Image (tube, rainbow, N blue to C red):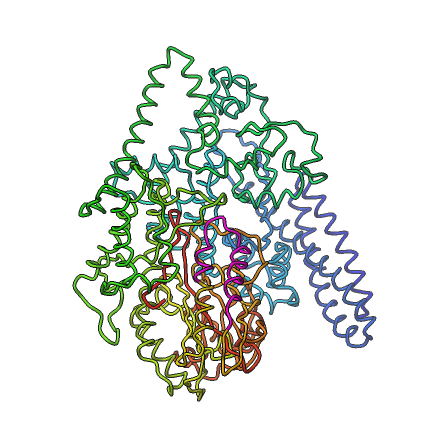
């Protein structure tokens, strides 16, 4: 039959489908519906038969142009076919409902025809590729379509395509709609969006990335509901939420006043679970919402903000000030467009970020002019200066510690307003007194907790009067700390200490200071660390060579603290972080994370100290790597993805700066004249320690090594919360390029390798997105609290630029890669091996050989070509030059920065 016949049938089908839609929208008649249903099924059968024959005849007998027209017509026919299937299915459903209703017997004396309410049609919302909504979508689709035996697979495929959009639809694009391909499309969707492990990881990531709530009730409620949603989803996926990490995450997402209430509650409930913690926080939020609602209903025409600016600068009549507020208006942040005040934006928390975003007038935030041309005469909400800056850009607000801000700016408006209203009412004076008593009780409880904790740490330390005596005791503690993290204490001469250790002595001692830190507080902290190292080992010493796992050396679970350093003291960061009680409390909240990193760091320290004694010229690079990795695995007590090596051992030589590790059969030998960069990492639960040093036997390279080491120390000293990354690069380059080195009678300037950088570190992610340049320029992004960074510098006697060279050995799964369908079975098998053993951590071919993998070269190439795995070839400067590297891992704690990987060697 000619193709025209199919078009004729298609036209009739559309008419019948229109009749079905009219019938369904009017009073339903079963007999008429059955006749129409029978006709539709007959035409559907004719349509499929003639369409299939027409495809075979027409497609293969036409040219490319006609084929394109044919495919366009075929697409229209598929839409008609889908419309036909929908009409048949709807008619069958309606007929079944009507017949069931008619068969129901009515137990009354007189029979009346039952009336049936027409239920709304079940609607399945299209799935757009959001992994968190896939399970909900699939449950509805599976029950309605996938398990419906009355539908053919091609009909199910049409339904599936119609219910997909955006990324999800793109995922199965190109698959021909047919019965045979339906299950393939389902498998692709299940593999990409139904992967439970991947979904669990995404929930963890979303929880970690939630912004911290402000004191406003809307922000508190939103944060609480987001946390509860993700935890509920994790429970549905079979995950237990009763882990300490969830307690830490919850603590980090709420403001200090909520945390104080929680700490008070914990005094009577020491065994607080995650579920009970959330219930208690929910109660606090509900109470605050009730108070706010009561205030708004009492003063419906007043602003919900706690008064005008005069309230916050010491007005004599706070109640009048409250009632003189402006009219209620909707909140909209200028920076992130969120529902909060502009000066409380968490997405742009620093003054530098906000000014960069404004890029115009700092007074009215307009981008059409600059400050000198602004005509808006407005006073700052905080400092009361006129025509100087917007309240969200007030330098005084950023200069002082956030915990000392006025209650009127940080607390919820409703709560503050309620307390003011209560002070006006005699009948509610008792309630005000009780509330004040509760606040005072909380304050005393918190002070007692802090004092007890501090006194418990220093009960065996005597502090003598006088600044000079305190300074002497502080220096003694510093030398003991320098004696080694986790090793036997030994006195170190003062002139052997480098600049980093010297900076610890620069912590200012406030004469006569009480409670809030000073020389006594610093001495207490140093004493705590030394005492912990002395007794933590439980009497068990390390073997030589080291074989005892670090967790067995420190059975109490408290691992040596790294080198603690003060932050740069300037307008970018709080000057009193080290003595601020709130910061110290937050520091203790994250102690579990720090402790995991410290365990990995101790394993790194002991491994590299062993290698420095063991290594000698003449060994092969494979022998060097295998000895180092064997020792690391023993000390870290390797356990799958929970503990192990973070990336392959880098042993780049001479002009090769990074990313070289020997593949199987590599005959390269370590020579006396080589300059070798030893770079390896360890991790505990994804907390990565990335640390490197340069090895050389010939003293003629000492100046090159010294230049790079001092540049790394400079970068560490410059790092800190709110410090811009580009500023660190400028200081590193200045130090690095102040050196020259004479090699074989020729003088070379030491250059920073400008296309290599330090980087931020996240759990199971060695490069977390932020880069720390080692030359002037780069990002103006700032460092933030509780971020981990690898501060590493590279110096060269060559051009100071590296390029890809030599055979690839380093590989790592692409952290941001989406789902990619793999057709080769060996590629699927290799990817499963990578996921099980390395996850998103780097690996090398030697490690695949160690796992028993064979004939994986083509599969590995296929994964690299598809972007699932990234290859990292060695990075080299020009041949004949020499390069050096030093690297440390730091964490920006609330109280100070800690160089976690610091050891006796460097």
Residue 529: percent from the left, percent from the top? 26, 54
Residues rendered magenta in the picture: 713-740
Residue 496: percent from the left, percent from the top? 33, 65
Does residue 842 lie above or below 344 as drawn? below
Q: Is residue 554 visible?
A: yes
Q: Does residue 795 show up magenta in the picture? A: no
**Image-quadrant location for residue 905:** bottom left
Residue at 31% of width from left, 79% of height from top? 614
Residue 95: percent from the left, percent from the top? 61, 47
Q: Residue furthest left?
A: 539
Front residue (pair 758, 697): 697
Residue at 36% of width from left, 80% of height from top? 626
Q: Does residue 718 show up magenta in the picture? A: yes
Residue 347 left/right relative to 582: right
Residue 79: percent from the left, percent from the top? 71, 57
Front residue (pair 710, 638): 710
Does residue 440 lie above or below 323 as drawn? below
Residue 552 left/right relative to 736: left
Q: Quadrant of the C terminus?
A: bottom left
**Image-quadrant location for residue 693:** bottom left
Q: Is residue 235 visible?
A: no
Residue at 48% of width from left, 30% of height from top? 409
């Amino acid at each position: 039959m000619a193709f025209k016949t199919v078009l004729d049938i298609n036209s009739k089908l559309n008419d019948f489908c229109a009749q079905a839609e009219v019938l369904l929208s009017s009073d339903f008649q079963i007999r008429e519906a059955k006749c129409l249903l029978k006709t539709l099924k007959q035409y559907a059968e004719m349509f499929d038969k003639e369409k299939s024959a027409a495809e075979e005849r027409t497609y293969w007998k036409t040219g490319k142009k006609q084929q394109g027209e044919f495919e366009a017509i075929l697409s229209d026919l598929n839409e008609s076919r889908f419309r036909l299937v929908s009409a048949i299915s709807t008619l069958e459903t309606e007929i079944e409902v009507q017949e069931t209703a008619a068969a129901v017997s009515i137990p009354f004396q007189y029979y009346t025809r039952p009336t049936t309410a027409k239920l709304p049609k079940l609607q399945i919302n299209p799935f757009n590729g959001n992994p968190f909504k896939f399970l909900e979508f699939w449950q509805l689709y599976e029950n309605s379509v996938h398990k419906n035996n009355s539908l053919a697979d091609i009909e199910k495929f049409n339904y599936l395509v119609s219910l997909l959009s955006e990324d999800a639809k793109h995922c199965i694009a190109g698959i021909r709609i047919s019965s045979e391909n339906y299950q393939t499309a389902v498998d692709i969707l299940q593999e990409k969006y139904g992967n439970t492990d991947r979904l669990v990881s995404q929930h963890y990531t979303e929880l970690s990335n939630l912004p911290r709530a402000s004191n406003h009730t809307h922000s508190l409620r939103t944060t609480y509901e987001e946390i509860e949603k993700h935890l509920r989803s994790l429970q549905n996926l079979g995950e237990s939420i009763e882990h300490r990490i969830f307690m830490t995450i919850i603590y980090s997402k709420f403001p200090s006043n909520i945390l104080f209430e929680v700490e008070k509650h914990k005094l009577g409930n020491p065994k607080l679970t995650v579920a009970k913690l959330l219930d208690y926080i929910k109660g606090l939020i509900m109470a605050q919402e009730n108070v706010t609602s009561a205030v708004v209903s009492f003063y419906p025409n007043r602003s919900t903000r706690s008064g005008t600016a005069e309230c916050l600068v010491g007005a004599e009549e706070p109640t009048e000030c409250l009632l003189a507020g402006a009219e209620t208006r909707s909140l909209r942040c200028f920076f992130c467009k969120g529902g909060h005040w502009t000066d409380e934006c968490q997405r742009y928390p620093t003054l530098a970020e906000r000014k960069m975003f404004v890029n115009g007038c700092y007074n009215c935030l307009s981008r059409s002019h600059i400050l000198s041309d602004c005509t808006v005469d407005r006073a700052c909400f905080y400092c009361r200066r006129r025509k100087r800056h917007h309240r969200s850009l007030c330098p005084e607000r950023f200069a002082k510690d956030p915990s000392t801000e006025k209650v009127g700016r940080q607390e919820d408006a409703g709560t503050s307003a309620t307390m003011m209203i209560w002070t006006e009412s005699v009948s509610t004076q008792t309630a005000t007194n009780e509330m004040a008593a509760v606040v005072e009780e909380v304050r005393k409880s918190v002070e007692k907790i802090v004092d007890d904790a501090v006194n418990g740490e220093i009960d065996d330390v005597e502090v003598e009067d006088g600044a000079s005596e305190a300074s002497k005791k502080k220096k003694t503690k510093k030398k003991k700390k320098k004696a080694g993290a986790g090793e036997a204490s030994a006195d170190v001469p003062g002139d052997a200490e480098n600049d980093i250790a010297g900076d610890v002595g620069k912590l200012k001692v406030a004469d006569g200071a009480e409670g809030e830190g000073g020389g006594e507080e610093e001495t207490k902290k140093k004493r705590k660390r030394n005492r912990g190292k002395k007794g933590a080992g439980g009497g068990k010493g390390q073997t030589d060579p080291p074989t005892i796992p670090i967790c067995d050396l420190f059975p109490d679970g408290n691992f040596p603290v790294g080198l603690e350093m003060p932050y740069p003291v300037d307008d970018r960061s709080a000057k009193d972080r080290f003595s601020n009680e709130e910061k110290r409390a937050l520091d203790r909240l994250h102690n579990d994370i720090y402790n995991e990193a410290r365990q990995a760091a101790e394993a790194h320290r002991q491994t590299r100290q062993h290698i420095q004694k063991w290594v000698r010229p003449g060994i092969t690079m494979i022998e060097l790597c295998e000895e180092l990795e064997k020792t690391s695995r023993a000390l870290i007590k390797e356990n799958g993805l929970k503990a192990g090596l973070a990336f392959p051992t880098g042993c780049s030589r001479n002009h090769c700066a990074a990313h070289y590790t020997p593949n199987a059969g590599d005959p390269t030998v370590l020579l006396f004249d080589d300059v070798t960069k030893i770079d390896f990492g360890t991790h505990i639960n994804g907390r990565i320690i990335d640390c490197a040093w340069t090895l050389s036997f010939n003293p003629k390279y000492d100046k090159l090594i010294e230049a790079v080491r001092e540049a790394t120390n400079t970068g560490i000293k410059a790092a800190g919360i709110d410090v811009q990354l580009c500023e660190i690069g400028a200081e590193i380059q200045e130090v690095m390029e102040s050196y020259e080195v004479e090699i074989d009678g020729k003088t070379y300037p030491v250059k920073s390798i400008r296309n290599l950088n330090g980087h931020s570190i996240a759990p199971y992610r060695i490069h977390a997105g932020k880069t720390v340049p080692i030359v002037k320029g780069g990002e103006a992004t700032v460092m933030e609290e509780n971020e981990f960074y690898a501060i590493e510098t590279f110096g060269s006697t060559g051009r100071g630029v590296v390029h890809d060279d030599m055979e690839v050995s380093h590989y790592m799964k692409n952290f941001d890669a989406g789902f990619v369908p793999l057709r080769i079975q060996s590629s699927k098998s290799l990817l499963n091996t990578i996921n099980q053993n390395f996850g998103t951590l780097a690996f090398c071919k030697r490690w695949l050989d160690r796992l028993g993998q064979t004939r994986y070269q083509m599969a590995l190439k296929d994964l690299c070509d598809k972007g699932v795995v990234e290859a990292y070839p060695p990075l080299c400067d020009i041949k004949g030059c020499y390069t050096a590297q030093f690297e440390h891992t730091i964490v920006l704690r609330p109280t100070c920065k800690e160089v976690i990987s610091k050891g006796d060697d460097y």
